[in-house]
Amino acid sequence: MQSIPRRKFIRQAGQAAALGYLGASGLGAAPGRIAIIASPSDAVASSAPAKWAAGELRSAIESKGASAVIAGSMGDAGDAAFAVLLGGESARLPREGFRIAPARISSKPAVRAAASDVRGYVYALTELADRVRHGADPLAALTLAATIDEQPANTVRSMTRAFVSDVEDKAWYYDKGFWRDYLTTLVTNRFNRFSLTLGLGYDFPRDVVGDYMHFAYPFLVDVPGYKVRAVPLDDAERDRNFEMLRFISEETAARGLDFQLGLWTHAYQWTESPRAQHHVEGLTPETHAPYCRDALAMILKACPAIKGVTFRIHGESGIPEGSYDFWRVLFDGVVRAGRPIEIDMHAKGIDNKMFDLAAATGMPVKVSPKYWAEHMGLGYHQAAIRELEMPREDSHEDAIFSLSNGSRRFLRYGYGDLFQEGRRFDVLFRMWPGTQRMLLWGDPATAAAYGQASHFCGASGIEICEPLFFKGREGSGLPGGRCGYADKSLNPQHDWEKYAYTYRVWGQLLYNPKADPEQWRRYLRTTFEKAAVPVETSLAHASRVLPMLTTAHQPSASNRGYWVEVPVNMPMVEHGAPIPYGDTPTPKRFGTVSPLDPQMFSSVEEHAAELLAGKSSGKYSPVEVARFFESSAAAAETALEAAAGSVASRKDPQFRRVEEDVRIQIGMARFYAAKLRAGVLYEIYQRTGNSEAHEQALALYRQARTVWAVMAERARGVYVADLTYGETPVRRGHWMDRLPAIDQDIAALEKAHFAASPAGSERVAPAIAGATGQPSRPGFQCAHTAPTGFQAGKPVALALSVQGQAPQGARLYYRRVNQAERWQAVDMQHEGRSFRASIPAEYTKSPFALQYFFELRQSSTAATLYPGFNELFTNQPYHLLTKV
């Protein structure tokens, strides 16, 4: 652990920042062993955030028993034996980049930190502070063997936290110590934006109970000229809420971070909500938009640290889609603030008229689509959205959702058609909290993949909905701590501290996908000592399980419908058990569940049909996914046992939090490995009536049930019986609650009967072997040089060469970077050891980039994709071409 509590670090840092920059006339002249030097004439290096960061470094040094001084020059530093000098070479460094280089100053050892902007200096100084905190000797930690050069891969690296429950969220919202520690953690790990999200407690203001700050304005300000109140909120509490908002935004800015305010609901009356805790008085349809405009302008003027505002502009905001006059008036509130403020519009339901309204303000504009629907998938962008998300021209929904459930449906859960040439907005991905909601997660390989993919097609970056984002949503908040531990000894002081490693890995690798692993391993060594390496390994393998499940087998794209960590069982047998998910293909059963990327992965039903037909599409099958789960679980368990044998104490709460969550994810991996195989066997049984397929499906499903029961029983002693992320059973409860539905489905599987069919009987045995075996893909030695780009209206010629064994055939798959369109395919011409095909000239006439991949067939039963996935599924499995 750290040598002194984090809170003490922060307190000392504030004192240092306040006192240390007095120069020769103040404490800067006092002698010190380590001097931190920034010339007062350097406006960037001596800016307020840089001063704060220098205070962090001074605090870290002093916590190790050494002395430190912050000075304006080396002469002011007295007899310092080592110096950290700020400045030099800044003009050549990129925005938010920094350089730390070994140096000598006046014959004394030193390091020189350089940056071209304030945030670069903050990152340089907090990097040095972090090295000191996690090192034994400050001088050794600051002495560099080589220059460190860093620059960001993604323009925006944002973390967002939601207030959704007055029961669970008031405590952290009002806690100033919480905010100082939390925001320091974000900037130390090179996030550059923090977003506070209000008004996301419900997907639509119907049957509302917990409505605190749902329509945020009357919970924050009293707007002159309007007598609007959230009854029964009193004035003192409203004013306290606003003062905290101002405090949080200012503390964010003090660290060099951008502060974003999320206002996701603009309805002021709840539909069918007799249990609502508050009601808004004083508004009419005529005054609604002007009030929102004036309230927003008032907040922005009083909180100058707010850099941007995020709006949900589709029907779930409570404002019917197509209400352009409302948004025109509201956006004027941003203009009236009198300074540049980013308008960030959530992509669902957006159209060109909304683009025009936002652009007309003259403010910077972002559009933020969901990355992997409302979940977290693998570290690339899905090659295709589910068929359920494709555009509908015949939507029967009411006017509230006329766009998002109709012609613009493809923007519900993806980037859709946003990546058009000449767009007047930036694109910012948002990773929704449907997969990793509560369990501890942190895989450097996956985080690095996201770091590479988050600037896809020139996107700005990514905003992550942090762990516990929806805890207590829909009025389900309960006292006792947001982490949900039944064993209270496992609760950290602040809930975010459980995820300190998660923040570290993701922040560092979104900033630089090739970051030095030392940036997270120093934390692991401090925290777990000899167990650091196996803890990293076990958590990495375990953390890959649920993103793979999200990508390859997704009963619902909605996080409201599907909680991947504690899922309600999707029945294998049609009509054999209740169907928990509406947002899934028909007929609704386990075998028909679509992958979230149906272009790269096959469903259970699809793969069973391929096995019986003796064909292969090259897609990644449920059996391959099962094998991935099996190997991930085995590797995670081996490393966890090694960690348990080398950790100082297995009773240490930090290790126990890791161990228990890793064991749950191991259980999930083994459950789904067995159930996916069972599902393929059951689909074979349905088609053939083969009794062996039935028996093996039943045996594997029972095996899966046993794994789940053991996992759930252990988790009963760790987590409370009612983990609440919403009001309905699919969003709350415990792993134990899911067993009855599993048992009911197994009983239905036992009784299921399909008559044997002689047709195709010769394929049944190989199909069963395929479902239960260890599949391997053809291993062609391919070479392909992607073009540097393409010209619109001209064909794109593509060639693939193969050394060694050649495939029997190859196909080119291509599509514009537009998820509203389907993939095109053409057989490639075989010329010697090369295969050739072209993307037609007519197809390239569009405002979109192109993406493509190849399918290679070894035989009718064996095929693979190129480039396909690497062993860890952490790469982009297709090529991307932009215009030249």
Image (tube, helix red, strand yellow):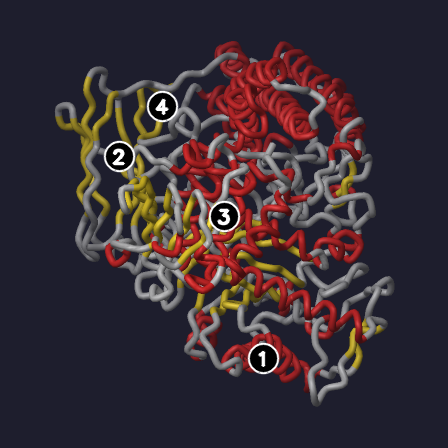
Q: Are marks 4 and 2 in contact (CB under 8 Å)?
A: no
- Mark 3, other Cα within 10 Å: few <14 / some 14–19 / many ≥20: many
Q: Residue at x 63, y 17 (%)?
A: 644
Above or below, 154 against 25 in this view is: above
Q: Is residue 413 left or right of residue 708?
A: left
- Does label 4 or label 3 sit earlier along the sequence? 3
Q: Secondary structure at mark 3?
A: helix
| x and y percentages locating residue 511 in the rendered image | 41, 46
**Which badge, 3 or 1, comes first in the chain's sequence?**
3
Q: CA distance from mark 3 to mark 1?
A: 39 Å
Q: Badge 1, how many Cα within 10 Å: few under 14, some, many 20+?
A: many
Image quadrant assignment for residue 852:
top left
Q: x%, y% of residue 833?
A: 15, 23
| Circle 2: element type | strand
Q: Few, some or many C-alpha atoms within 10 Å of disc 4 (few <14, some 14-19, many ≥20)?
A: many
Q: Amino acid at mark 1?
A: Ala
The residue tagged 2 is 827
Left/right of residue 174 with respect to residue 296 in the rendered view: right
Callout 2 amino acid: Asp
Q: Give residue 58's mark.
A: 3
Quadrant where the C terminus is found in the figure: bottom left
Mark pair 1, 4: CA separation: 59 Å
Alpha-carbon distance for marks 2 and 1?
A: 58 Å
Reading the image, the residue beneath label 4 is 863
Residue carrying label 1 = 297
Mark 4 to mark 3 CA distance (whole Å): 59 Å
- Mark before the other along the chain sequence, 2 or 3: 3
Residue type at tag 4: Ala
Q: CA distance from mark 4 to mark 2?
A: 14 Å
Question: Is there a contact, CB below 8 Å, between mark 2 and mark 1?
Answer: no
